[in-house]
Image (cartoon, grey):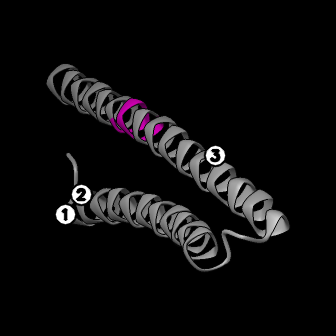
Amino acid sequence: MESIRDKLAFERTKLANERTLLAYVRTSLALIAGAVVLLQFFSSIYAYEKIALVLVCLGVMILGVGIYRFRTVSAELKRGFSAVKSQQLHREIKSKAIDAGG
């Protein structure tokens, strides 16, 4: 049988995964905002335009990595949680069969 401790641990892990995604989003938005500031105030300087372009590209890449990581960890959590539940169910059935036979 699944204990409340296991359920809470699983929920904490899911929430940690969501917090990590939000950190990726926050970082990418900060990079993109920095690029906008560079373009807004220093658009006449060619080097700053290139730096802004690099910042936007980095921001988009970091966002993509964050979304990919979130989805893969979520899928692993779902797969792992269902595997744990099936193992527990198998143990319960086995112990009941032993109790009934013995």
Q: Residue furthest right?
A: 47
Q: Residue at x 40, y 67 (%)?
A: 19
Work out how far the residue at label 1 is from the one at label 3, CA to CA, in angstroms. Answer: 38 Å
Type of amino acid under label 3: Met
Q: What separation in Å lies between label 1 and label 2 (alpha carbons)? A: 5 Å
Q: Which amino acid type corresponds to the residue marked 2 in the rendered image?
A: Lys
Q: Residue furthest bottom?
A: 41
The residue carrying mark 3 is: 61
Horizontal side, residue 102 vs residue 66: left or right = left
25, 40: nearer the viewer? 40
Q: Observer-nearest residue: 62 or 12?
A: 62
Mark 2, Cα crowd under 10 Å, few <14 / some 14-19 / many 20+, is few
Q: Mainly helix, strand or loop, the magenta region?
A: helix
Q: Which mark is residue 67?
A: none
Give the extent of the magenta segment.
Answer: 76-81
Q: Mark 2 = which residue?
A: 7
Front residue (pair 15, 11): 15
| Residue at the extreme left of the image, as rendered | 100
| Marks 2/3: CA–CA distance | 34 Å
Which mark is first along the chain, 3 or 2? 2
Residue 39 picture location, percent across and down: 61, 68
Question: Which residue position holds label 1?
Answer: 4
Characterize the local packing of mark 1: few (<14), some (14-19) or many (20 or more) Cα atoms within 10 angstroms: few
- Which kind of residue does numbered mark 1 sit on? Ile
**Dot 1: element:** helix
Specify few, some or many for label 3: CA neighbours under 10 Å numbering under 14, 14-19, or 20 or more. Answer: few
* Residue at the image position 48 percent from the left and 65 percent from the top: 29
